[in-house]
Image (cartoon, grey):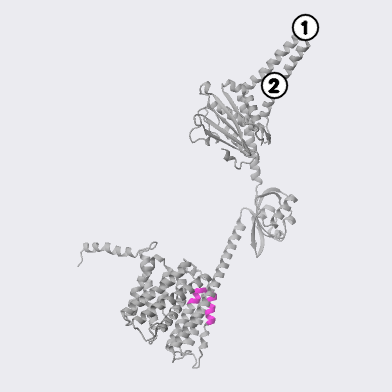
Amino acid sequence: MRTTGQIEARQPSYRLMLSVFAVPGWSRGRTLRAMAIVAVAYYIGVRIGLALTMTTQPVSTLWPPNAILLAALLLTPTRAWWIMLLAALPAHLAGELSHGIPVTMVLSWYISNSTEALIAAGAIRLFDRQARLDTFRRVVLFVLGGVLLGPFLSSFLDAAFVMWNHFGSAGYWEVWRTRFLSNALATIALVPVIVHTATARLDRMREIPLRRSVEAVLLSVGLLGVCIVIFTGTIAPQNASVALLYAPLPFLLWAAVSFGPGGAGASVLVMALFAVWAAIHGHRPFDATSAHANALSVQLFLIVTSIPLLTIGAAVAERRHGEQALRRSEERFAVAFRSSPDALVIVHRSDGAIVDVNVQWEKMFGHTRAEAIGQSTEDLHLFLHHVEASRFKARLASDEQLQEMEVLLRSRRGAVFRAVVTAQSVVMMDEPCVLVVIRDITERRRAELELQTQRTELAHLSRVALLGELSAAFAHELNQPLAAIMANARAGQRLMARKPPDSAEVRNILEDIVADDRRAGEVIRRMQALLKRGELQLQPLDVNEVVREVVELLHSELIRREVLVHTALAPALAHVPADRIQVQQVLMNLLFNACDAMAEQPREARSVSIVTSGTLGAVRISVADQGVGIPEGKEEQVFEPFFTSKRHGLGLGLSICRTIVSAHGGRLWAVNNADRGATFHLVLRRNGSSHDVWTLG
């Protein structure tokens, strides 16, 4: 009697034994089930093979175990092959030892059987990782590697084992021939059936139509009936010819065409079992006096017949799968076409005639699908401008893909809307067509226009706010010429009162008055320009001239804030397309920010440097201050709306500046200086595009 401790002591060794059979990705239960299935199937195959062995031959006429083992290897990962081979060993021993075969011969046959399965499975897996026979290529690979190569090579070893063990009276080449044909026939008859059954999905099998089930039953009954009539020897006539072997051929073709390689393999297997049994027992239509010749004839007949049947079945199945995939693709396309939120229309590439439209297209243009099919865009007058219609038709006729063409379209009721049109080549009913996608962007353009208007208003308000800050400076700038005008006017009055008046001196005074008047008028003109509200006006702009104007305009304010401005303007800078007033606004904002950043610095440390530079395609303005700098990591955040470090700031100035610069196709960014303060860089390109601007930073 075992104690509890003894039982517990044995548990680790039991677990260790199970861990030896562990397959990555497989559970222990799955591994054990696979081993059990292989063992049982292999044992049944051994019994069938021994039953189909002639008494005068050491090799069976049809040997299923090797085919069963090959199918098991094809259905399992390579890391589990050794487990499948090990599972077959006890079944092999139990099946053949009980038949009175010597142990050495049994073990030798196990080696040759395993060798054949490994050669065939390795050759197939070398070119295809999936265990399926659903394409012509895979069937050809299976025939070459599994049906021919594996049995061909392993039969040399098997015949040598038979000679070595002195088992039977047949010669080496007779054993080799019988064994090769036997295993080739078993492989081509069994493996497709096993692989197809193992890889068939149960959910798909439940969805098999009733018509297909009835067809399978009729095929099975017909094939079994013909085989019974021909091969059992009870119903066939006495003078039956070997030509009756071709009687099941219509059923084999039926199985291959309707049910693919799996159906062809199952039909061949049924016929092979009947035919081999009849051949080795001498039943009609075979000659009872020549069992060896009968077996050879039926083996060659079945092998030669099965190979084209399998390839036909694979080709038909592959085409059927392709048609099903195409049908599913067309169904998915139809669903996407009908339910698309964009208007879709399919037109012939050659003449532009409409093939089909979706519901959204009908809603957009007001034409029904029946009215649109067969008509062209010109017939329906969809384009507002004839030039755009001609350009669209020309692009459709060419092989070029139409990308983002913006056009004005009109509906049946005359409503005009703006849309973006794209086109993609498709094939419908074997004819080249074009799928046109139409997206209404009227509301988007209206929203963009409103946004642009709001940005313009915001920039204008920002300029007004700047002028509010500059009111004292402007007053000072105006007071100087006005006071000079007043003084010169009174002096002129006194000179005119003399007898005689000094006309030369009066003339000089009048010239001074004109100059001061122009100076005051220039100040007022600049104020009016900054206050003026308008759209972006791009004109060739001299950046150096703009810098000088801004510095001159802010002269009094810079003196009031005790800030010294240094300019280093590069000579002969290329002109860039820009709006003068808006660029002035950006520079004024940057100068004001520089002054605010240095407000707490000593007077002698308050200096700003304005540097201009340029390349072949762009110019850059850099404004550097000696202030407190930008907080670490906030270099980009300072351009976000409402972000500010000022006590009374709104945080909109730099955001508006970046918006203005982006509208010009340029770039505005900030970096901290190595010593102290920060530098703001403004880049404008000569072609007004933002492409490759960043290389200047």
- Residue at 54%, 70% (x, y): give it: 318
Location of mark 2 (residue)? 519
Q: Residues within 10 Å of mark 2 (few under 14, many from 20)?
A: some
Q: Secondary structure at mark 2?
A: helix
Comparing 408 with 558, the one in front is: 558
Relative to residue 532, is residue 300 drawn left or right? left
Give the quadrant of residue 74: bottom left
Which part of the image, by quadrant, shows the N terminus?
Answer: bottom left
* Amino acid tagged 1: Arg
Comparing 333 with 35, the one in front is: 35
Location of mark 1 (residue)? 498
Residue range (magenta): 249-265
Q: Earlier in the sequence, mark 1 or mark 2?
A: 1
- Residue at 49%, 68% (x, y): give it: 204
Residue 617 on image: x %, y %: 63, 39
178 vs 576: above or below: below
Comparing 430 with 604, the one in front is: 604
Residue 501 on image: x %, y %: 78, 9
